[in-house]
């Protein structure tokens, strides 16, 4: 069977995704973007590899959507409005047109949901597993990006959504029999696995974060690990109240059955929720503005002056011994 060459591949599968005139219909090697007056460009990139960030037998539309969403999550953490994205994909030697068509359909679905467009990129073949990288672009009003280094002692730490669902989903995906041992119902298993497969970029929080937030980071490598990254950038520390950290009903069922899962829940990664800090006097307004978007923000702790130290505290304020389990890329 003859497969399309690169030019035909781009014309058939990717050019239909390039709606913005800035993409030049993918006929050039560049896109030409205008940044509106009074705004700054925010750029982020994430690479995903088969067998590392997704399973080889995952549905291709889900792989595409995850790749785009993890980048949109980075933009959300900066309170940035998405503009578009660049895609580079290295296709394994056994790729098929059906696989690529489904992959492109996944991108099209999320473009429609999140209001972004393909701006360009590159396609190559590899003798290894399929690997892809997306570079996402967005804008923020000048000086309003939520930089990690902006956190200050006394700030309140909040986190969106619930923590640990994706890590549990991955655990179950690797060991399906674990679900029964944890007392999880079929619906709870589906929920956890879906949270791993399809992150929810919290772009709806952008106005609330932009008005009331000070520093932000998305939770990709684990809540404790990523809070630590924010603190190191700011030269601060953080005290987190474990009892306050929001967990889904499914995660609570699993934790009750196996308390040793706490480390995986709090630092297993792939949450793609947002950690944001704000002045103590702004936390009520921030939480209320987030609630109005349908995405809860929960205060879970406070920024301290203890440089680089993230402490987990119990309900009495005593420190909990914790072995960090955050994801490492190498």
Image (tube, grey):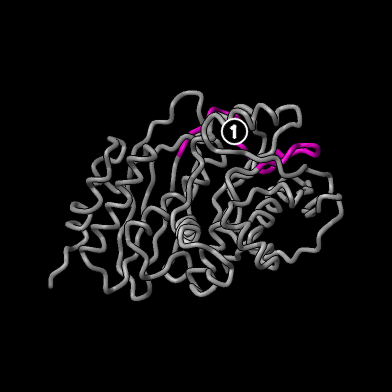
Above or below — where is 103 with respect to 325? Answer: above
Q: Name the outermost residue toward the top.
A: 37
Q: Position of residue 256 (x, y in %)?
A: 67, 62
Q: Is residue 131 left or right of residue 238?
A: left
Do we see residue 115 in this rendering?
yes
Residue neighbourhood size for the residue with mark 1, other residues' Cα within 10 Å, grouped as few (<14), some (14–19), many (≥20): many
Q: Is residue 287 left or right of residue 114?
A: right
Q: Residue at x 63, y 60 (%)?
A: 265
Q: Is residue 217 magenta?
A: no
- Residue toward you, 28 or 238: 238
Range of magenta residues: 138-158
Q: Position of residue 53 (x, y in %)?
A: 47, 64
- Residue toward you, 32 or 131: 131
Above or below — where is 316 with respect to 140? Answer: below
Q: Is residue 305 left or right of residue 33?
A: right
- The quarter of the rendered structure image containing the N terminus is bottom left
Residue marked by disc 1: 209
């Amino acid at each position: 069977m003859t497969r399309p060459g690169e030019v035909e591949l781009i014309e058939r599968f990717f050019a239909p995704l390039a709606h913005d005139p800035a993409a030049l219909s993918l006929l050039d090697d560049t896109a030409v973007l205008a940044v509106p007056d009074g705004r700054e460009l925010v750029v982020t990139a994430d690479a995903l590899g088969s067998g590392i960030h997704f399973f080889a037998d995952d549905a291709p539309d889900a792989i595409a959507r995850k790749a785009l969403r993890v980048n949109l999550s980075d933009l959300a953490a900066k309170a940035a409005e998405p503009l578009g994205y660049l895609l580079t994909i290295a296709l394994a030697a056994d790729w098929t047109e059906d696989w690529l068509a489904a992959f492109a359909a996944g991108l099209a679905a999320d473009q429609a949901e999140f209001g972004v467009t393909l701006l360009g990129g590159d396609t190559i073949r590899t003798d290894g597993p399929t690997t892809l990288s997306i570079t996402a672009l967005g804008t923020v009003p000048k000086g309003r990006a939520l930089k990690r280094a902006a956190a200050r002692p006394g700030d309140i730490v909040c986190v969106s959504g619930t923590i640990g669902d994706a890590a549990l989903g991955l655990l179950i995906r690797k060991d399906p029999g674990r679900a029964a041992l944890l007392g999880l119902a079929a619906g709870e298993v589906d929920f956890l696995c879906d949270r791993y497969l399809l992150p929810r970029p919290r772009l709806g929080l952008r106005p609330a974060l932009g008005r009331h937030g000070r520093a932000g980071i998305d939770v990709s490598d684990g809540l404790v690990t990523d809070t630590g990254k924010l603190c190191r950038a700011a030269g601060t520390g953080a005290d987190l109240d474990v009892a306050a950290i929001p967990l889904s009903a499914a995660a609570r069922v699993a934790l009750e059955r196996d308390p040793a899962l706490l480390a995986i829940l709090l630092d297993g990664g792939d949450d793609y929720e947002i950690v944001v800090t704000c002045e103590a006097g702004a936390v009520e307004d921030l939480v209320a503005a987030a609630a109005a978007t349908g995405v809860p923000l929960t205060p879970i702790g406070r920024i301290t002056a203890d440089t680089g130290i993230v402490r987990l505290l119990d309900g009495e304020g005593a420190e909990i011994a914790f072995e960090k389990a955050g994801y490492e890329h190498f």
